[in-house]
Image: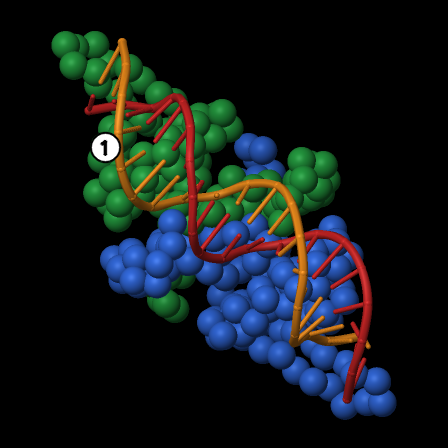
Chain colours: A green, B blue, C orange, D red
Amino acid sequence: MFRTQQQRRDLCKKCPVARVADILGDSCTLLILRDLLEKPRRFSDFGNSLSGISSRTLSNKLKRLEKDGLMVRKELAGRISHVEYALTKKGVALHDVIEAMRKYGKKYL
Amino acid sequence: MFRTQQQRRDLCKKCPVARVADILGDSCTLLILRDLLEKPRRFSDFGNSLSGISSRTLSNKLKRLEKDGLMVRKELAGRISHVEYALTKKGVALHDVIEAMRKYGKKYL
DNA sequence: CGGCATCCTGTCGGATACTG
DNA sequence: CAGTATCCGACAGGATGCCG
């Protein structure tokens, strides 16, 4: 699915579910969002909760989320490098989706 | 994510969102569910709405959905082979998730 | 119509090592 | 700490052809 960019555009144009699917459509991103909804995180925080996701993959997913405007990267001042990732309004709005998922998961899975 | 079976089990055990992610976590499956929520479908129905998904992929996704108990395959009597796919109760319950996604997609994407 | 078998390629993502 | 670079294997999934 969404193999070519054209195909992706076509399907996304037609349906809002497809547009969300385009962003949520992989479990990894979903779990990152789940964590960020709770509170802002630092790069290394994800390593633990996501059961050893590789830094490469994490980096890629975060870039995608930032590009899509769901999340912002903040460099905080200090002697050592300190970066924080936090959801934007657009990202926080996914709360309802994630909660619907959590509710379903609890009840049926 | 969910690269090994063990990893998948571990993450799924911890969090309901992860469990839903395990099923919904790819756009293709999601769109199949979207269609099935509307009404039962036949194999070839998906080819159109999913913009040319290959029969191989479609077959695999349907099998997974059936295995997970979200959907049942019904062979209907008749001279020519006629199969229908319909959601189970567990599948229909995903309505809220999909609708939350639709709402979000409409508003923000 | 509703698939399955085979082949083959692209992409994802882990492992490892390195940097400012 | 927060990544980037490179390499490489696994696998998803398209294309094609065939079958009951």
Q: Residue at x 35, y 21 (%)?
A: A73
The total of numbered circles placed on residues is 1
- Asked where in the image residue A4 lies, by quadrant, the reply is top right
Badge 1 crowding class, 10 Å Cα cut-off, few under 14, some 14 to 19, many 20 or more, is: few
Q: Residue at x 52, y 52 (%)?
A: B26
Q: Amino acid at mark 1?
A: Ser
Chain holding disc 1: A
Most extreme residue toward the right is B79
Q: Residue at x 67, y 36 (%)?
A: A5
Q: Residue at x 76, y 90 (%)?
A: B77
Q: Secondary structure at mark 1?
A: helix
Q: Which residue position is annotated with label 1?
A: A44
Q: Position of residue B42 (x, y in %)?
A: 73, 71
- The correct choice, above or below, for A35 with respect to B67 in the image is above
Q: Position of residue B11 (x, y in %)?
A: 29, 56
- Asked where in the image residue D12 lies, by quadrant, the reply is bottom right
- Asked where in the image residue C20 lies, by quadrant, the reply is top left
- The correct choice, above or below, for B3 with respect to A23 in the image is below
